[in-house]
């Protein structure tokens, strides 16, 4: 017993310097935010964009004199850890940020591969985490301390169903998807359920599948041609979309073809060419044709880095924004890291109608945002913002 | 299912079956001569498509600069060039990987395993040299869509089907009417006596690989023209299925490979099509491969040597 108490005291004593360094330092108060992103490895470009967006956001706040929390001004300090695009490095980076650097909250990691295990680390260490980009439901599932800034995969089904119904007034739909891959399969089923909810049972007149690696879809497409479907939904990846779209044209299909965010790869445009012109899909954000705050962000980013920001940059910008908003909403920080982290977590859970550049967000109890998706139209060989669509 | 939809499925099946048949021919010819299942053959198909891609891109690049080459010439040059170079790859594989084993009297099992490894080698060589990104095959033939009485088809589809039929007829004539063709058939009939009659074994084997690889190259280019997307693993699945088609047709039998290839194409397409017939709505396209391979299994159970195969006594 005595040993345990000494241990606790020791442990407390060890965390004390961290706390004092956080709260002390004279006039300038500092809030530390950790960034767990892939600066190297196979998705290094994702990390580069995240870093730029986060730094822009922090600079904006600090240049304006810092963040006002409960009447006190705080300077934001960004601590960037490279997770090397690996799951194990991402958890190690999170542990370091939480225990050594004593950050108030973590933004990142970006891809689900790293975000799912890192979510567990943050949840156990009771530190708020927001993943800007991870769409896998498991990242936030049963983890009250973990949030995300993007919508989940299943969410796009209803969004696309609504969009097609409102835009074209169609009532009959066909679906073509890869039955052996989680993402398309889940999305195809979500779309079918949402569509049948809107137009009644039997309104999805063809629900056709293939398996990963198939390249000939002529049988399924001919079958769809023989139905009275008005729209074809195919939530496939960039290597399959051109095949499906071109074969559909060659078989004389007249249905409008729509897709999901997996279409949003520049490779789709390259491989599909003219065949994809005019088609629609749902996604997080579109740079072409953006307006308002989104446009301002894109312009600022382009001016600074000479490149168009991708969706991961926009979502990181929003994740940082939500976090800063939540810190402000706590109404004041105590300087006790554990208490402050809990306060930030509670404030995050209560965020309502946050006006982000990727849409308005409200968090569900699971830590997933309810937000609108962007509908993109492929026009002149570019992804063009077309409309917003809400569930 | 109306007649137009039926005809549409029929055309689709002809095109899809053409690819299986062309690739199955390569499996069956090598097996006929060497009793070797050349599992690298699906990847030779991939190599043929990529070589075609590079030749076509190169020729189109020249045309764009100074003097334009007519598109029919580009197509012909691409097909011929790819056939020659892919034959070279096939020959090299035979010379480097299979012949040394054969000459040392290695068990056929080892050669089959070597073939599997060569296949993986070709895939990952492509992956490391060219990266994982898919390539768009240049449009050598301007794709035109025609619709007659509700049936839509493209000129590419007709060319694919037409070329396959011509090539298969030519191959059949070659095997029946020429000396090399006769030697091939003779070797597949008796591997001991025929070389003693003065037939150059290695030359005939080389000729087999040249023909098989050329057909794979042709299939690769037509595949690129019809489906437009190339990837490093494009030969795996189609190669396996073509092999199964060759077995169902009776491996070693050239006619068997053609029939087996078209049969598999037709079964795959019409299993999906059957879901449109009243009473079969439960048959979703998810069951396609399951049903297709059940049918093939039944065929093999009834006729284990394949449709055209003849049981041969193994001398022990």
Image: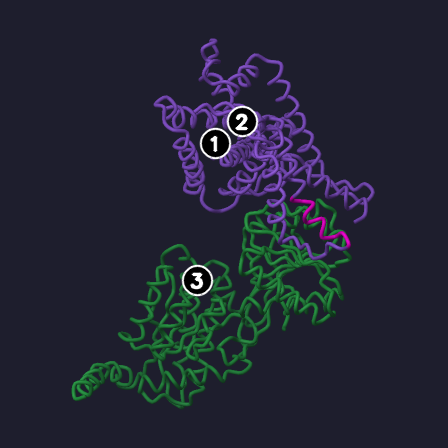
Chain colours: A green, B purple
Residue B222 position in % (x across, y down): 61, 34
Q: Nearer the viewer, mark 2 or mark 1?
A: 1
Q: Are marks 2 and 1 in contact (CB under 8 Å)?
A: yes
Per the image, the residue denoted by label 1 is B38
Q: Is residue B277 magenta?
A: yes
Disc 1 packing (10 Å; few <14; some 14–19; many ≥20): many
Front residue (pair A305, A286): A286
Report the Cα–Cα distance between label 2 and label 3. 49 Å
Position above or below: A302 against B295 = below
Q: Secondary structure at mark 1?
A: loop
Q: Is residue A158 left or right of residue A3?
A: right
Per the image, the residue denoted by label 3 is A49
Report the Cα–Cα distance between label 3 and label 1. 47 Å
Image quarter of the C terminus of chain B: top left
The span shown in magenta is B268-278
Q: Nearer the viewer, mark 3 or mark 1?
A: 1
Q: Is residue A390 magenta?
A: no
Same chain? Circles 2 and 1: yes
Dominant secondary structure of the residues highlighted in magenta in the image: helix
Q: Secondary structure at mark 3?
A: helix
Residue A218 position in % (x across, y down): 67, 46
Per the image, the residue denoted by label 2 is B212
Same chain? Circles 2 and 3: no
Q: Is residue A206 visible?
A: yes
Front residue (pair A387, B157): B157
Name the residue: 57% across, 74% down: A371
Name the residue: 64% across, 25% down: B167
């Amino acid at each position: 017993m005595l040993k345990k108490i000494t241990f606790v005291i020791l442990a407390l004593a060890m965390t004390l310097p961290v706390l004092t360094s956080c709260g002390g330092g004279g006039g300038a108060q500092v809030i530390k935010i950790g960034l767990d992103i892939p600066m190297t490895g196979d998705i290094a470009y994702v990390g580069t964009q995240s870093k730029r967006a986060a730094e822009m956001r922090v600079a904006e706040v600090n240049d304006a004199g810092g963040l006002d929390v409960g009447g006190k001004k705080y300077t934001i300090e960004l601590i960037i850890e490279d997770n090397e695009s690996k799951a194990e490095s991402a958890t190690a980076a999170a542990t370091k940020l939480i225990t050594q650097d004593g950050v108030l909250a973590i933004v990142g990691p970006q891809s689900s591969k790293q975000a799912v295990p890192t979510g567990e680390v943050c949840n156990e260490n009771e530190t708020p985490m927001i993943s800007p980009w991870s769409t896998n439901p498991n990242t936030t599932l049963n983890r009250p301390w973990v949030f995300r800034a993007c919508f989940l995969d299943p969410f796009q089904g209803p969004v696309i169903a609504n969009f097609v119904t409102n835009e074209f007034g169609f009532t009959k739909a066909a679906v073509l998807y890869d039955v052996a891959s989680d993402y398309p399969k889940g999305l195809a089923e979500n779309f079918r359920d949402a569509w049948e909810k809107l137009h009644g049972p039997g309104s999805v007149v063809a629900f056709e599948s293939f398996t990963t690696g198939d390249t000939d879809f002529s049988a399924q497409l001919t079958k769809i041609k023989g139905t009275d479907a008005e729209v074809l939904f195919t939530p496939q990846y960039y290597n399959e979309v051109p095949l499906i779209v071109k074969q559909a044209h060659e078989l004389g299909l007249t249905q409008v073809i729509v897709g999901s965010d997996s279409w949003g790869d520049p490779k789709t445009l390259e491989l599909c060419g003219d065949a994809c012109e005019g088609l629609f899909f749902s996604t997080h954000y579109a740079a072409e044709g953006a307006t308002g705050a989104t446009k301002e962000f894109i312009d600022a980013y382009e001016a600074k880095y000479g490149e168009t920001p991708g969706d991961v940059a926009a979502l990181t910008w929003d994740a940082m924004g939500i976090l800063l908003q939540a810190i402000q909403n706590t109404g004041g920080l105590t300087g006790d890291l554990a208490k402050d982290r809990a306060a930030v977590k509670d404030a995050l859970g209560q965020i309502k109608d946050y006006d982000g550049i990727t849409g308005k967000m409200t968090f569900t109890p699971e830590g997933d945002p309810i937000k609108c998706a962007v509908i993109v139209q492929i026009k002149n060989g570019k992804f063009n913002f077309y409309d917003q669509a809400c569930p | 299912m109306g007649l137009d939809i039926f005809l549409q499925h029929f055309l689709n099946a002809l095109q899809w079956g053409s690819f299986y048949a062309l690739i199955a021919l390569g499996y069956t010819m090598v097996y006929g001569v060497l009793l070797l299942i050349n599992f690298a053959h699906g990847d030779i198909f991939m190599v043929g498509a990529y070589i075609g891609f590079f030749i076509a891109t190169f020729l189109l690049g020249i045309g764009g600069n100074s003097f334009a080459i007519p598109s029919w010439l580009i197509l012909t040059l691409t097909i011929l060039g790819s056939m020659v170079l892919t034959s070279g790859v096939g020959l090299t594989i035979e010379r480097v990987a299979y012949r040394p084993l054969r000459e040392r009297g290695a068990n056929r099992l080892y050669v089959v395993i070597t073939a599997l490894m060569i296949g993986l080698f070709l895939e990952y060589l492509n992956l490391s040299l060219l990266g994982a990104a898919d390539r768009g095959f240049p449009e050598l033939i301007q794709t035109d869509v025609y619709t007659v009485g509700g049936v839509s088809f493209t000129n590419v589809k007709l060319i694919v089907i037409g070329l396959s039929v011509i090539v298969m007829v030519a191959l059949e004539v070659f095997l029946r009417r020429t000396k090399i063709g006769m030697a091939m058939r003779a070797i597949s009939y008796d591997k001991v006596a025929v070389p003693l009659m003065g037939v150059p074994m290695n030359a005939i084997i080389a000729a087999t690989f040249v023909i098989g690889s050329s057909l794979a190259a042709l299939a690769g280019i037509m595949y690129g023209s019809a489906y437009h997307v190339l990837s490093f693993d494009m030969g795996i699945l189609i190669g396996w299925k073509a092999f199964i088609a060759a077995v169902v047709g009776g491996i070693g039998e050239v006619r068997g490979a053609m029939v087996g290839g078209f049969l598999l194409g037709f079964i795959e397409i019409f299993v999906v099509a059957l879901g449109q017939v009243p009473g079969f709505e439960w048959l979703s396209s998810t069951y396609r491969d399951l049903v297709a391979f059940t049918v093939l299994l039944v065929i093999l159970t009834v006729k284990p040597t394949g449709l055209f195969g003849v049981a041969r006594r193994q001398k022990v």
